[in-house]
Structure formats: structure tokens, C-alpha cells
Image: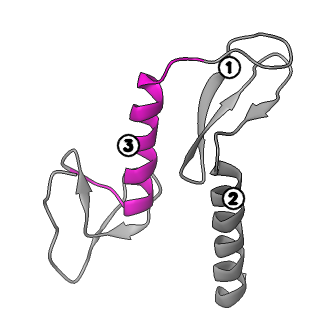
């Protein structure tokens, strides 16, 4: 984050998702969740690829719910690091509760 904050009654829209935000990342209006996703993608790009434990194919990195998931392009299996399933479950439950509270 470059530390800039937009001040004013009308906040800009996040360049990735369109949510109103006063935060900026790389000089662009970017909400906190999109900033986290961008940072995770950058971190994932620097990680080494792992072989799929099922068929040995090199897995690709995907970001979902603020965690980096290894996914096999051949068998479509996914691999989670320690603690990531709990984080994923908690994040999905939190989003479901927010949707219920908003009446969606």
C-alpha cells in the first residue's frame, strides 16, 4: 500500500471490484480485500511449484478467500497448507452471515 488516502464525501471505486474505497494501492483506488488478494498473488508467484500428490503434475497457484491454493491442472485436485482449510471455512461462514444480515 502506498499510504495515500482519498478524503471526501464521494469515495472512488476499487479498480478491481467496484466497491467504494478510500484506500489506494499502487496509486490506484483499491479496497482492502482486493489489496490482500493482489499481495497474495505476488507472494504466490514467488513460491515454488509443488507436484500433485496424486499424479505428479506441477500444480498452479490460485487465490481464493485470501489464501493461496495449489491446484492440479490434470486431475483438478487441490492442496491446502496447514491451517488453510480452517481459514477458508471461517471466511466462507463469515461471508454467509454477512449476506444473511444484508438480506441477500
Front-lying residue, 82 or 32: 82
Q: In the displayed structure, would residue 103 be above or below residue 12?
A: below
Q: CA distance from mark 2 to mark 1?
A: 21 Å
Front-lying residue, 78 or 15: 78
Give the main secondary structure, helix, strand or loop, of the magenta stretch.
helix
Mark 2 sits on what residue?
86
Q: Earlier in the sequence, mark 1 or mark 3?
A: 3
Q: x and y percent of residue 54 in the render?
A: 86, 18
Q: Earlier in the sequence, mark 2 or mark 3?
A: 3
Question: Where is residue 7, by image quadrant?
Answer: bottom left
Mark 1 sits on what residue?
59
- Circles 2 and 3, Cβ within 8 Å, touching? The answer is no
**Residue at horizontal 69%, vertical 59%?**
86
Q: In the displayed structure, would residue 50 be above or below residue 6?
A: above
Q: Earlier in the sequence, mark 2 or mark 1?
A: 1
**Residue at horizontal 82%, vertical 29%?**
77
Q: CA distance from mark 2 to mark 3?
A: 21 Å
Q: In the displayed structure, would residue 59 be above or below residue 95?
A: above
Is residue 103 visible in the rendered structure shown here? no
> What number is the disc on residue 48?
none
Q: Is residue 47 magenta?
A: yes
Would you say 63 lies left or right of 44 here? right
**Residue at horizontal 78%, vertical 10%?**
56
Mark 3 sits on what residue?
39
Q: In the displayed structure, would residue 30 be above or below residue 68?
A: below
Are there few (<14), some (14-19), or many (20+) residues within 10 Å of tag 1? many
Is residue 16 visible in the rendered structure shown here? yes
Q: x and y percent of residue 2 in the render?
A: 16, 51
Amino acid at each position: 500500500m502506498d499510504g495515500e488516502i482519498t478524503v471526501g464525501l464521494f469515495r472512488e471505486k476499487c479498480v478491481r471490484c467496484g466497491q467504494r474505497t478510500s484506500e489506494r494501492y499502487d496509486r490506484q483506488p483499491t479496497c482492502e480485500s482486493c489489496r490482500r488478494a493482489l499481495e497474495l498473488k505476488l507472494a504466490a508467484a514467488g513460491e515454488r511449484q509443488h507436484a500433485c500428490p496424486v499424479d505428479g503434475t506441477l500444480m498452479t497457484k490460485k487465490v481464493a478467500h485470501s489464501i493461496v491454493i495449489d491446484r492440479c491442472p490434470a486431475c483438478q485436485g487441490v492442496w491446502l497448507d496447514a491451517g488453510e482449510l480452517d481459514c477458508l471455512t471461517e471466511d466462507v461462514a463469515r461471508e454467509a452471515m454477512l449476506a444473511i444480515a444484508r438480506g441477500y
